[in-house]
Image (spheres, rainbow, N blue to C red):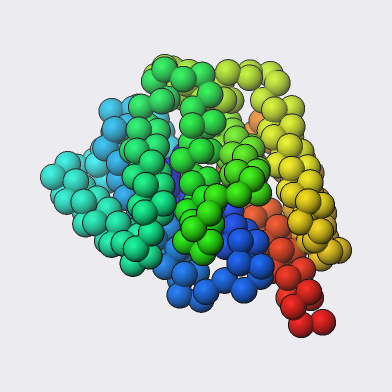
Amino acid sequence: MRLDKPTGVLVLVWPTLWALWISAGGQPDPMVVWIFILGAVMMRSAACIMNDLMDRDFDARVARTRDRPLVTGKVSTREALSICAVLLTLSFSLVLCFKNLTMICLAFVALFLTATYPLTKRFLSLPQLYLGVALGFGVPMAYAAQTDALPKTCWYLLVASVFWTLAYDTEYAMVDREDDLKIGVKTSAITFGRFDVKFVMACYAAMLGLLAWIGQTLYRGWPYYVGIGAASVAALYHFTLIRDRDPEKCFKAFRHNNWIGACVFAGIALDYLRQLYF
């Protein structure tokens, strides 16, 4: 997945915000929230550079990506590596602000997963699964930052985030399916073939169903489920966009995923707000 667009940043931020609010009982430390958002922006930028460095030969052979800076030579490999190093250093400095060993260990795991994801497209039939784990690591990091613990709910949220990534990044992969087939890149859109739309919708259903179950285990109120309901409507809208596999509509569905993440977060935040003040 291309990570240098606003969509790429926000789909990381939303699950992290879900975890920050739930782990803190609706009252996360504002400074922690800002640190995580800033860290997400910097890590996304670094991940984008690492992805482009490893994929620049492939990108040159795909119509949508052949004008990327590393492909055209507008940015040199040395410049890209230097910028990436600065971003990673700044991101790690934010982790050190917490003085939390669990956070530091999780940060190293997240970095490894993010850095190695581009390689998985060479040999894994479902690289989106690997990407989902990498993108979802903000969830356990959020729990570690605020509670210094990793309860079961934390891992359930991570799994929900992975299902979401499988859904939206398969939509993204459907855009480049023909080019990916030519150059030999593996994606979920290619692996599932004519069942790609069903796979996307099944992943949305698994994500939303798991979030609803989490709500039950935490005894959440009606705003929480209204948020999930709104996200479900958005997911159904995606079906109307991707069912004909038109690349432009599939890309529109991918970008629309910000609304799904926002709906879930709004439900979580409003439910805790209702509980705390009303």
Would residue 254 be seen by someone viewing this image from the given angle? no
Q: Does 89 appear above or below 166? A: below
Q: Does 273 appear above or below 245? A: below
Q: Is residue 75 left or right of residue 35?
A: left
Point out residue 113 in the picture as x, y percentages from the top left corner: 39, 37
Q: Residue furthest left?
A: 78
Displayed quadrant of residue 92: bottom left
Point out residue 119 in the picture as x, y percentages from the top left corner: 36, 27
82 and 218: which one is in front?
218
Q: Residue furthest bottom?
A: 277
Q: Is residue 46 left or right of residue 240?
A: left
Point out residue 68 in the picture as x, y percentages from the top left corner: 32, 43
Displayed quadrant of residue 236: top right
235 and 205: which one is in front?
205
* Residue at 54% over, 31% down: 129
Point out residue 30 in the picture as x, y percentages from the top left corner: 51, 76
Q: Does 38 appear above or below 153? A: below
Displayed quadrant of residue 39: bottom left
* Residue at 51% over, 19% down: 125
* Residue at 57% over, 71% down: 28
